Amino acid sequence: MTQRQLMAIVRQPVFVVITLVQPVIWLFLFGQLFRKVVELPGFGAGSYLDYLVPGVVVMSAVSSNMWAGMGTLEEIERGTLNRFLTTPVSRAALMNGNVVQQGVSTAVQSVVIVLLGRLGGAHYPGGVGGLALLIVLSVLLGTVFGAFSNALGMLVRQRESIIGINTFLLLPLTFLSSAFMAPALMPGWMRHVADFNPVNWALVAGRSAMAADPDQSVVLGRGGALLALAVAAVWLSTRTFRSYQKSV
């Protein structure tokens, strides 16, 4: 089922390019616009581009995977999903094949963003190992939102509802995190909310992994929480699919 989803991307590679437009805007326009904020006392980073690259990687994973449910709805409308129900294929594979495909796409996009950041002058003290951990964290976060989006598609079964919910969630998830601003410069209540934001978990763990002296407890703690949340989201999407199957 994942191969089927990947073949669709291979036939339309321009889709991957289009999804990189917004991250490139964030990386270079935001990077130039806010590059002097590192001069504020307490920011704690030498270069804003160094700080921004993990934020762009993580936010790209979120914004790309939040729309997985739209593909599931399209499968329902075409009747493809119902035809697959007559086969012995795993129901978990039916529901999460596109999540795995999104994970592969997220990894590729993350690598491209990291390379673009390096070309722009970003530095990665954590080396290849730190970058690999950042990409793994972005894939885990993408899995959370991709599986959640699939579950949402099964529950609401309307494109307008998914668009409205995703639009409602994207900005709070972005700005109630340390994607673009150091936690030390955020209002206290925002820092407390960010502690419960999975987007911020990926950012904190990713930035720590990319540091010259990574804090393993932070990386493992936040990474483990993301892994548990991803497993729960996949389980939820499979359960909602079984409820859909009973209604057919």
Image: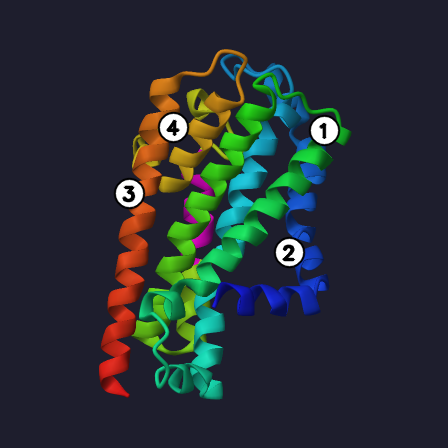
Three-letter amino acid code at the position of disc 3: Ala
Q: Residue at label 4?
A: 187
How far apart, in angstroms, are the residues tagged by discs 3 and 1?
32 Å
How far apart, in angstroms, are the residues tagged by discs 1 and 2?
20 Å
How far apart, in angstroms, are the residues tagged by discs 1 and 4?
31 Å
Indicate which label's residue lies in the foreground, 2 or 4. Answer: 2
Q: Is residue 65 left or right of residue 226?
A: right
Q: Is residue 2 left or right of residue 6?
A: left
Q: Nearer the viewer, residue 58 or 6?
A: 6
Q: Residue at label 1?
A: 118
Q: Residue at x 41, y 87 (%)?
A: 83
How far apart, in angstroms, are the residues tagged by discs 3 and 2?
27 Å
> Which disc, if any, is residue 19?
2
Indicate which label's residue lies in the foreground, 3 or 1. Answer: 3
Residue 20 versus residue 91 in the image, above or below:
above
Q: What's the magenta bit mostly, secondary-structure-wise?
A: helix
Residue 60 versus residue 132 in the image, above or below:
below
Three-letter amino acid code at the position of disc 1: Arg
Q: Is residue 18 left or right of residue 191?
A: right
Residue 220 in sight here: yes
Residue 67 in sight here: no
The span picked out in magenta is 168-177
Mark 3 touching mark 1, by CB under 8 A? no
